[in-house]
Image: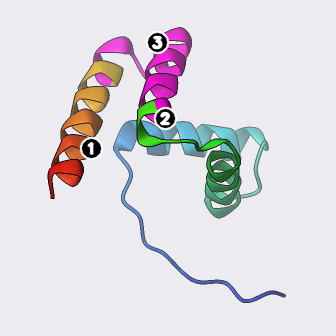
Amino acid sequence: MSATDKVSVRFPSGLMRQIDELVEKGDFSNRSELIKEAVRFFLLHYESPEELWETYKLLARERRIPPEEEIEKLLEEVDEEWKRARSS
């Protein structure tokens, strides 16, 4: 087995529910597998913070998962965090 590093991450409860649903459906064997695949996918497609933000908004609105109100709140939080990070 190759060496791995352990990371602790906190997720909003809505995202955890979605992760758990995919694991329960059998799409992934466990949470770690899903998260590793999501990070791999992200790294393959990442171009810039601006491109990521625009893509995320588009996908979030199209899929409407979680509910649109929760997406808007999450997008606002991400936007504020991104602005804070850029100003530091």
Q: Quadrant of the N terminus?
A: bottom right
What distance separates the C-alpha of mark 1 from that of mark 3?
A: 19 Å
Q: Nearer the viewer, residue 22 or 45?
A: 45
Please identify the quarter of the rendering in which residue 62 is found: top right
Q: Nearer the viewer, residue 16 or 75?
A: 75
Q: Secondary structure at mark 2?
A: helix
Question: Against 35, is 65 above or below?
Answer: above
x 48%, y 14%: residue: 64
Can you identify the residue that label 2 sits on?
Answer: 52
The spot of residue 23 in percent (x, y) is: 68, 47
Q: Type of residue at label 2?
A: Leu
Q: What segment is highlighted magenta in the picture? A: 51-70
Q: Quadrant of the C terminus?
A: bottom left
Q: Type of residue at label 1?
A: Trp
Please identify the quarter of the rendering in which residue 30 is found: bottom right
In primary-sequence order, the first of circles 3 and 2 is 2
Can you identify the residue that label 1 sits on?
Answer: 82
Number of other residues with Cα within 10 Å of mark 3, as a class: few under 14, some 14 to 19, many 20 or more: some
